[in-house]
Image (spheres, rainbow, N blue to C red):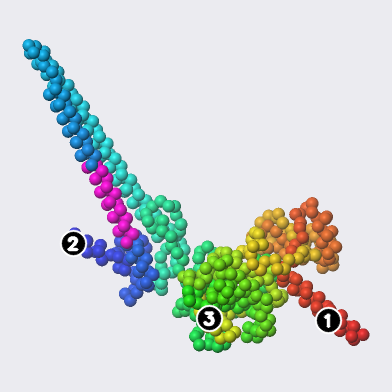
Amino acid sequence: MAGEQDTSKAASSWKNASAANQAKFRLVELPEDFKPTKEEEALVNMYQTIKQFERQAAKLKEQKAREKLTAKENEFKQSQANKHKKRRRKRDNVPTASGDEVSDDSSAEDYSSDEDEEGQTIHDRRTAKLDALRDEVDEKKKAMVADAVKAEKLRKNHLETNEADIAMGSSLKRKKLEETSSEGGLLSNMKIDTPPHEFSEKLNIKSWKGKTLFPSTPDEKQWTPPEGVGNPNVGAFLVELPDFDITKAQNGTGNNTIVIKFHAPDDSKRFSINIAGPGHDDFNSVLFHFNPRQFERGGQLVVNDKQEGIWGQSIALPLSQVPMIFGQEAITLQIQINGDGFDIFMQDKHCVRLEHRKELPSKPCSLFLQFPSCDDYGSPENWMVYRAWWGNQPAMAKGDLSGVAGVNSFNAVHPRKLFVSGLSKISTQTEVDIRRAELERAFRKYGGARGVTCIVPTNQTFAFVEMETDRMADLALSEMASKYRLNRARRSRHEALQEERAAKEAGKAGKSEGSAW
């Protein structure tokens, strides 16, 4: 029976779990033709190795305690032997009085009784010391057992209490490990890196907040530019960015962020990303161009735009001022669109901003994302895209942006818009509607016949109110300052482009009327 039990225990593993382990850990039996991936095999082997290390460490601790106990006992024996030698020397050197035999006998008897009493005391001390050492060893054993039980509880909690699963293959799923305290075994203190083809949990990317652009099917692993192509549009990766509304993007409620997980090899010279609007004419007009160049002028990150086939004034940033791009296992790039422009974040660092150089569509539309296969001169591009996502994310550009390249290339005070701060934070659409109605009612007399225009972002403590004229804005700023915390709002680049277009159209209309007259 013992041999059969040993055989069943040896046969029970992660590939062929026993019935008891299946019931205990809620395991699902794998199909016979299941083949784990390299990552899964590496993770299981790592777990088994760590268990071996923990057992070996426990054995070494116990062995060390026993060696310490043995050394203490030998030391005690040696000290007792030395004391006995000293007593013998003293007894041999005691002077004897001639002719006083009775006295000699009595002194010998007294010395013998003293020696017996001292020996008995030493024996008691040694016994007490040995008992104390045994108690110390027992306490250490109990502490080791308690630590092992605690570590087992932590592992059990990791495997059973967490509800979010991380897919590790087509048929195998493991429970996601959350951060715990530094106590416990080696597994609890281990740092688990995000796989190259997955987004980090810190990004808080949710399926209901957006759409995965790549991979579109489970069979797609990565995208790389084709070789031997002389046209950037031939073989390029092209995908639509649906439901873009600049008004919602400015308020933080609509789709505004592109997240790309990629790898640029160490020998890659360059690669690029384009974002274009409707009617781009095969990307002859590009709203945003992102282009790292590793070997040009010591390494540069170039951002630019292109209108009707002509490139604009580029912003060139040394690669030494941004997180490392080339030669890394995986890099996360975030491009966020707002009223000021395109904000570029790499590894959570705000690297550069390209302010809007052309007015974005005022109505909801689709933008287009392209990964060209080569540059305009046919030079190949070398990189690998693991994942791409499009959706809504909270505003990432915060605080002092004066040190960010491309920021404040346009800066002006809006003549009719006021910034209302110090409001309570709101999160639901009902609260947004109530606040908008409250502000419209409070500033109604400064809006003329049409009333004021209010912009109320969610999850924020501020709002914007636009008056009818500059004079009305000045009047509201002076009269409503006692009720609200008011300041002049800064005019975004998108609003400036709208005003420039309106001024040009008004100028053309005036000229046409003058010529007709």
Residue 52 covered by magenta stretch: yes
How many numbered marks, from 0 up?
3
Query: Residue drawn 80% across and 65% down?
Result: 415
> Rounded to the nearest whole Å, what is the CA distance between mark 3 and mark 2?
63 Å
User: Could you tell me residue 131's position as x and y percent?
Assistant: 24, 36
Closer to the chain start, of discs 2 and 1, is 2
**Residue range (magenta):** 49-70
Q: Is residue 430 visible?
A: no
Task: Give the labeled residue for mark 3.
Answer: 381
Between residues 449 and 99, which one lies in front from this camera angle? 99
Q: Nearer the viewer, mark 2 or mark 1?
A: 1
Main secondary structure of the magenta stretch: helix
Image quadrant where one finds the N terminus: bottom left
| Dot 2 alpha-carbon crowd within 10 angstroms: few under 14, some 14 to 19, many 20 or more | few
Earlier sequence position, callout 3 versus callout 2: 2
- Amino acid at circle 1: Lys
How far apart are the alpha carbons under marks 2 and 1? 97 Å
Q: Around disc 1, counting alpha carbons within 10 Å, would you say few (fewer than 14), some (14 to 19), or many (20 or more)?
A: few
Q: Secondary structure at mark 1?
A: helix
Name the quadrant of the C terminus: bottom right
Q: Quadrant of residue 209?
A: bottom right
Mark 3, mark 2: which one is toward the viewer?
3
Q: CA distance from mark 3 to mark 1?
A: 44 Å
In the drawing, does residue 97 fall left or right of residue 194? left
Q: Is residue 8 above or below residue 309?
A: above
> SS class of the residue under badge 2?
helix
Front residue of 311/147: it is 311
Residue drawn at (80%, 60%), measured in percent from left and top? Answer: 443
Q: Which residue is mark 2?
A: 3
**Residue drawn at point x = 72 percent, y = 61 percent:** 463
Q: Which percent across, then down, holds residue 502?
A: 79, 76
Residue 508: image tag? 1
